[in-house]
């Protein structure tokens, strides 16, 4: 099972169902991705909590004028086929109305941050 794909699909589905919060199993990479999404405004908050005996990540969802902020996601790099991009190959998503999340030597960054930092990396997913 692809845990990152599960997390972004849970965010998209919960947003479409107009939930306020979605709870996903915790991992460090998911927390870093959630922090990146918080910085970009796609989710409100990401907090680590304990549920019984295992940690979970609680994500507060964002809505704009009653409409969900996240309308679509596209998982690019999968466990069976890793996709890497250099800094000169990073293009805006949906004419600047979406984000691409990459894992780089400088951490988890969006496409805009990666171009600013002049680093490329593995393309995790696109979100709009």
Image (cartoon, rainbow, N blue to C red):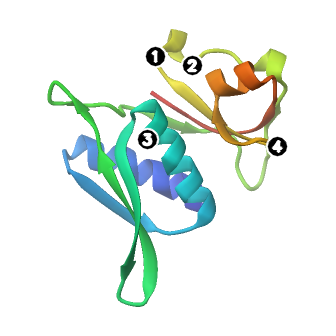
Is 82 rendered above or below residue 68?
below
Residue 16: x and y in percent read: 25, 41
Residue 114: x and y in percent read: 71, 27
Q: Residue at x 55, y 57 (%)?
A: 30
Q: Earlier in the sequence, mark 3 or mark 2?
A: 3
* Mark 2 secondary-structure assignment: loop
Q: Earlier in the sequence, mark 2 or mark 4?
A: 2
Circle 4 sits on which residue? 105
Circle 1 sits on which residue? 97
* Mark 1 secondary-structure assignment: loop
Disc 1 to disc 4, how far (Cα)?
25 Å
Extreme residue toward the top, this view:
95
Circle 2 sits on which residue? 93
Query: Label 1: few (<14), some or many (≥20) within 10 Å?
Result: few
Extreme residue toward the bottom, this view:
53
Q: Residue at x 35, y 88 (%)?
A: 52
Circle 3 sits on which residue? 38
Query: Label 4: few (<14), some or many (≥20) within 10 Å?
Result: few
For the question of whether residue 1 can be seen, the reply is no
Disc 3 to disc 4, how far (Cα)?
20 Å
| Quarter containing the N terminus | bottom right
């Amino acid at each position: 099972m692809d845990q990152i794909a599960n997390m972004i699909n849970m965010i998209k589905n919960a947003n479409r169902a107009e939930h306020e919060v979605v709870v996903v199993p915790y991992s460090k990479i998911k927390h870093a991705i959630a922090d990146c999404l918080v910085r970009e405004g796609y989710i409100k908050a990401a907090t680590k909590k304990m549920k019984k005996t295992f940690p979970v990540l609680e994500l507060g969802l964002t809505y704009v004028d009653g409409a969900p902020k996240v309308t679509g996601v596209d998982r690019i790099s999968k466990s069976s086929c890793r996709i890497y991009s250099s800094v000169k190959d990073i293009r805006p998503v949906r004419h600047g109305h979406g984000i691409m999340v990459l894992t780089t030597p400088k951490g988890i960054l969006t496409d805009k941050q990666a171009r600013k930092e002049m680093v490329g990396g593995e393309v995790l997913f696109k979100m709009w």
